[in-house]
Image (cartoon, grey):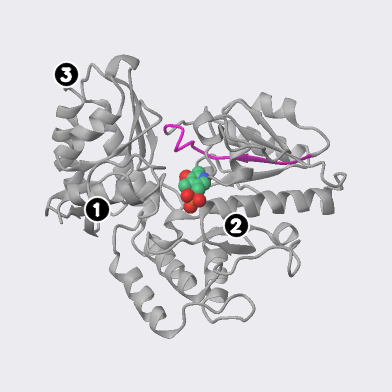
Amino acid sequence: MNTQEFIKIEEQYGAHNYHPLDVVIEKAEGVWVYDVEGRKYLDCLSAYSAVNQGHVHPEILKALLDQAKKVTLTSRAFRNDQLPLLYKELSEMTGYDMSLPMNSGAEAVETAVKLARKWAYQVKKVPRHQAEIIVAGNNFHGRTVTIISFSTEPLYRDDFGPFTPGFVVVEYGDAAAIEKAITPNTAAVLLEPIQGEAGVIMPPEGYLKSVAELCRKNNVLFVADEIQTGLCRTGKLFASQHEDVRPDIVIVGKALAGGFYPVSAVLADKPILGLFAPGEHGSTFGGNPLAAAVARASLKVLREEKLAERSAELGAYFVEQLSEIPSPHVKEVRGKGLLIGVELKPGAGGARRFCEALKAKGILAKETHDNVIRFAPPLVIDKETIDWALPAIRETLNMK
Ligand SMILES: *Cc1c(COP(=O)(O)O)cnc(C)c1O
């Protein structure tokens, strides 16, 4: 079957909740993906940073296959021999005492919301069911009803209410607004260290540090959603570390399983994560042995291939090269590590047409929020490949 035939079937039988580029991928390796016509593309999205380790990484593949032959699912009614080791390795790598495994990112965000509320009632003694969580405008934390309840994007919310109460939205990047919004009932501040989906929005320098200090001063938990910015994407294990911030709760997902499997987790120290008692929260698939084995291998690749350092180095180079492109359309190039956004001017005609043009030149990037092109290739990319892509990007950014 050819591209058009696959697309026709997909459009007929699938819900239209995405607007994908019309490329039908059938295999991938490292930074490259191949479509059903045999064309080869550089992946500059990395499945929204889920494949930081590169597509079909051989060591993660091996872990998946080996584990799949042994045991894949036990449920948490019984123990398995992979989850304890994932717990230990996550703790050693991140410095947090404990973790709680889930599957999708949204589930881990939901878990963090429940955890922050439980902490508020049990530890801070907020009157029951009065806890408030402060979030930022233009956030993206997932798609469940509770999470879209504090989204500010009409597209994510309209027609999906009634909404979950208990959230206060303030402007992203404004620490004073958070200070003003804190009340005796505030359980937590939940933020993305860089807002990826909003268009790679970087907060002003010192913002995370100020917020973390405000939280400490006011006995409020600082929760960082590092699902996209974490696990080496921005040049450090966590983006919060760029400001020496250690959030009370960190949420990870996406690259935690190198693109092989949905695995997410909430990380925190024992006085917080230790609050969950048996039966209060769970997931049939969360922490299953296949997920745990894949996550262990994925973390090992991040460490052994020094992907944080690589992202920092190559990201700085990529941003510098992109910034030097003379273009009538570009308003700003920004990013940290290999999480890069190219914001176009309002008159540029939207990012989509540039992504279509890049696709025709063998580069897959995706527009985010109409006027930003995100460049976030797998962290295993090398300088030669970036140099290969630059002329095509240069040409595209100069089209009529
Ligand atoms: C992708 C993402 C999520 C949601 O993860 P899913 O696995 O799609 O549920 C949450 N927060 C951030 C910052 C993300 O980028």
Q: Within 10 Å of the Cα at label 3, are there few (<14), some (14-19), or many (20+) other Cα atoms?
A: few
Q: Within 10 Å of the Cα at label 1, are there few (<14), some (14-19), or many (20+) other Cα atoms?
A: many
State the image coordinates of residue 217 (x, y, percent, origin top left): 76, 37
The one nearer the camera, 33 or 227, is: 33
On residue 31, which mark appears? 1
The one nearer the camera, 95 or 251, is: 251
The one nearer the camera, 55 or 300, is: 55
- Give, as a three-letter code, the residue at label 2: Val
Pair 3/2: label in front:
3
Q: Which residue is mark 2?
A: 266
Separation of residues labelled 3 and 2 (CA atoms): 46 Å
Q: Which residue is mark 3?
A: 400
State the image coordinates of residue 106 (x, y, percent, origin top left): 55, 50
The one nearer the camera, 26 or 298, is: 26
Quadrant where the C terminus is found in the figure = top left
| Residue at 15% from the left image edge and 57% from the top image edge | 1
> Which label's residue is closer to the chain start, 3 or 2?
2
